[in-house]
Image (cartoon, helix red, strand yellow):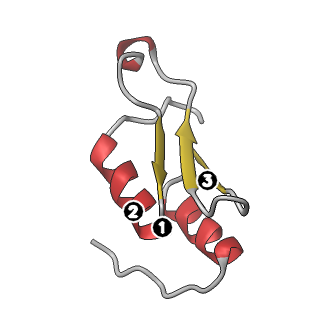
Amino acid sequence: MREMPVVDGADAQKAALREEFPGWSIIHTTDTGRWWAMRGPLRREDMDKTATVDADTPDGLRSGIRALDVPARDGL
């Protein structure tokens, strides 16, 4: 596993998460401070799997994305 860079600020954290998880949309809501990740479209055989994750921190979001293990759709 590669070592994660140390980054400060929500924009830098979003950029790091997007680089680590291509195919995921990363959102940080400033009003609640929550982090969200969404993936799609999913293949038909993956429709029963979760395609969204939310967390209180960027590291929590990272862990949640890793836990899903949903393959990306080819070509996206």
Q: Residue at x 46, y 44 (%)?
A: 53
- Mark 2 vs mark 3, CA separation in Å: 13 Å
Q: Position of residue 65 (x, y in %)?
A: 39, 50
Instruction: Give whichever of 10, 40 is nearer the camera.
Output: 10
Tell how many labels.
Answer: 3
Horizontal relation, residue 71 to residue 9: left or right: left
Q: Would you name the residue on which mark 2 appears?
A: 60
Toward the top, the furthest residue is 44
Q: Residue at x 41, y 69 (%)?
A: 59
- Please state which amino acid type lies under the numbered disc 1: Thr
Q: Residue at x 38, y 35 (%)?
A: 71
> Which element carries disc 2, helix, strand or loop?
helix
Q: Is residue 19 above or below residue 64?
A: below
Q: Are marks 2 and 1 in contact (CB under 8 Å)?
A: yes
> Which element carries disc 3, helix, strand or loop?
strand
Q: Quadrant of the N terminus?
A: bottom left
Horizontal relation, residue 1 to residue 37: left or right: left
Of labels 2 and 3, earlier in sequence is 3
- Please state which amino acid type lies under the numbered disc 3: Ile
Q: Would you name the residue on which mark 1 appears?
A: 57
Q: Residue at x 36, y 35 (%)?
A: 70
- Which one is in front in this view, the residue at disc 2 or the one at disc 3? 2
